[in-house]
Image (spheres, helix red, strand yellow):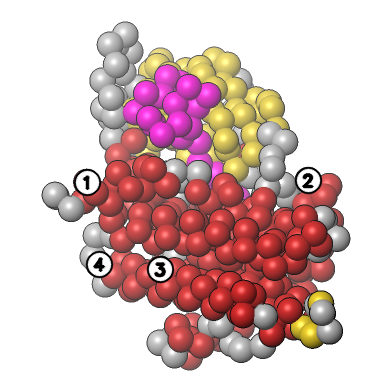
């Protein structure tokens, strides 16, 4: 089977290739043999947190002064693709932690907060999560209603958060809460970001979602019932929390693009192997032009999506604002993942529709990449808006 990474590999440094192979070997031994069972049982494997932390994969983008590896965005995304090719659920743990809570703390937290929370997060001792969405506010994030009211040296918090990835295992949850008490909606203003930990009085984990895909990644609702949050848990300006969150979503969207490419690549790899092994009418189905054209289109789309992602990562590492590029990469990669996994099932035929073969899981895992951290429709809005800024 050809090396489908060769085009982009040519531009990787020796250190990046070394980390790529480290991630690939780790995934092969620690994730791939168990991923199907974890999916079937909807089982989150907590030992992955320590194992990823020991490799430094939970602090890849955090500077060494805060106990991270201080690596560039591209190196992180190359490693993330390898984890995603083995299991998208393991990849989303790594993606959310590296892209959202740690980057928000790095950019906006006080030095005291960085030492108390960011350092152990970089070491993999605390898993990070992100709580922006609510049952009534998804794409319209500014309409969130969970309320934080200042009371002396604490904030009293009431409300519900939904779609919280890794919620039951997170030690630090960066949470957006409305800090103004006005009954008139003020959009994105008057929203703060807070460091929430599960030991706070009034913190409750409630419904765990029974999902179509990413079944080994727990997604939960959080309920805050007169939760008392110390004042020093507020990150930065109490009115700019949504701004911080949206800025971090540029990082998150690059991570979801890498996850998507890993899913698509795995489906393509399986399809190539199956087409060579499966015989009909006395010959391998890969000899049929219809199958060849599918594989050609699948290969082209995966390579194009990866090339766009790597270009966006290099731009970010060069200090360029990548809001549009991140949305382009996420949109292209997620729709590629959905399309490639669909074609893989078609190549497998009836066997692609059953759990005995891996492509149906990849298909289920791919769908959410078109939805979370900004739907495909939202990505198109962002891309178009950026044309005029």
Q: CA distance from mark 4 to mark 2?
A: 39 Å
The answer for how far apart the CA atoms under marks 1 and 2 are is 39 Å
- At 58% from the left and 38% from the top, the residue drawn is 164
Residue 102 horizontal side relative to residue 269, left or right: left
Residue occupying image coordinates x 59% and y 22%: 223
Residue 15 in view here: no
Task: Give the residues in magenta.
Answer: 123-146
Q: Earlier in the sequence, mark 2 or mark 3?
A: 2
Q: Is residue 88 above or below residue 12?
A: above
Bin the neighbour count of mark 1 within 10 Å (Cα to Cα): few under 14, some 14-19, many 20 and up.
Answer: few
Q: Is residue 135 magenta?
A: yes
In this view, the mark in front (4 or 3): 3
Across and down, in percent, residue 388 comes to 14, 49
Determine if residue 378 is in view. Answer: yes
Q: Residues within 10 Å of mark 4 (few under 14, many from 20)?
A: few
Residue at point 30%, 44% (across, down): 381
In the drawing, does residue 250 fall left or right of residue 384? right
| Cα–Cα gap, marks 2 and 3 | 30 Å
Residue 33, horizontal then vertical, whole percent: 82, 68
Earlier sequence position, callout 4 versus callout 2 = 2
Disc number for residue 163: none
Residue 385 is tagged as 1
Label 3, residues with CA under 10 Å away: few <14, some 14-19, many ≥20: many
Which badge, 4 or 3, is on the more N-terminal residue? Answer: 3
- Mark earlier in primary sequence (3, 1): 3
* Helix, strand or loop status at disc 2: loop
Disc 4 designates what residue?
A: 319
Label 2: how many Cα within 10 Å (few below 14, some 14–19, many 20+)? some
């Amino acid at each position: 089977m050809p090396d489908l990474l060769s085009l982009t590999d040519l531009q990787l440094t020796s250190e990046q290739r070394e980390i790529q192979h480290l991630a690939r070997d780790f995934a092969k031994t620690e994730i791939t043999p168990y991923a199907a069972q974890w999916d079937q049982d909807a089982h989150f494997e907590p030992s992955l947190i320590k194992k990823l932390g020991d490799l430094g994969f939970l602090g890849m983008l955090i500077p060494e002064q805060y106990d991270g590896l201080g690596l560039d965005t591209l190196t992180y995304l190359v490693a993330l693709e390898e984890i995603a090719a083995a299991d998208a659920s393991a990849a989303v743990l790594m993606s959310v932690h590296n892209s959202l809570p740690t980057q928000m703390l790095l950019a906006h937290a006080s030095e005291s907060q960085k030492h108390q929370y960011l350092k152990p997060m970089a070491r993999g001792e605390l898993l990070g999560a992100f709580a922006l969405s609510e049952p009534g506010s998804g794409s319209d994030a500014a309409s969130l209603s969970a309320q934080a009211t200042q009371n002396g040296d604490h904030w009293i918090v009431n409300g519900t958060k939904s779609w919280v990835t890794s919620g039951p295992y997170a030690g630090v949850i960066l949470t957006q809460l409305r800090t103004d008490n006005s009954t008139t909606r003020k959009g994105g203003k008057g929203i703060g970001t807070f460091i929430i930990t599960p030991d706070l009085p009034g913190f409750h984990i409630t419904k765990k979602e029974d999902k179509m895909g990413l079944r080994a990644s727990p997604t939960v609702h959080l309920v805050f019932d007169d939760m008392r949050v110390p004042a020093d848990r507020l990150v930065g300006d109490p009115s700019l929390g949504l701004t911080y969150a949206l800025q971090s979503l540029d990082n998150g969207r690059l991570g979801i693009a890498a996850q998507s490419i890993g899913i698509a690549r795995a489906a393509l790899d399986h399809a190539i192997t199956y087409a060579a092994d499966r015989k009909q009418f006395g010959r391998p189905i890969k000899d049929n032009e219809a199958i060849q054209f599918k594989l050609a289109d699948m290969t082209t789309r995966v390579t194009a999506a990866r090339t766009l992602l790597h270009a966006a990562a290099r731009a970010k590492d060069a200090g360029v604002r990548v809001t549009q590029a991140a949305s382009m990469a996420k949109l292209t990669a997620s729709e590629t993942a959905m399309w490639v996994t669909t074609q893989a099932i078609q190549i497998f035929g009836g066997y692609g529709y059953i759990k005995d073969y891996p492509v149906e899981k990849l298909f289920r895992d791919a769908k959410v990449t078109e939805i979370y951290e900004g739907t495909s429709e939202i990505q198109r809005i962002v891309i178009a808006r950026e044309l005029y800024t």
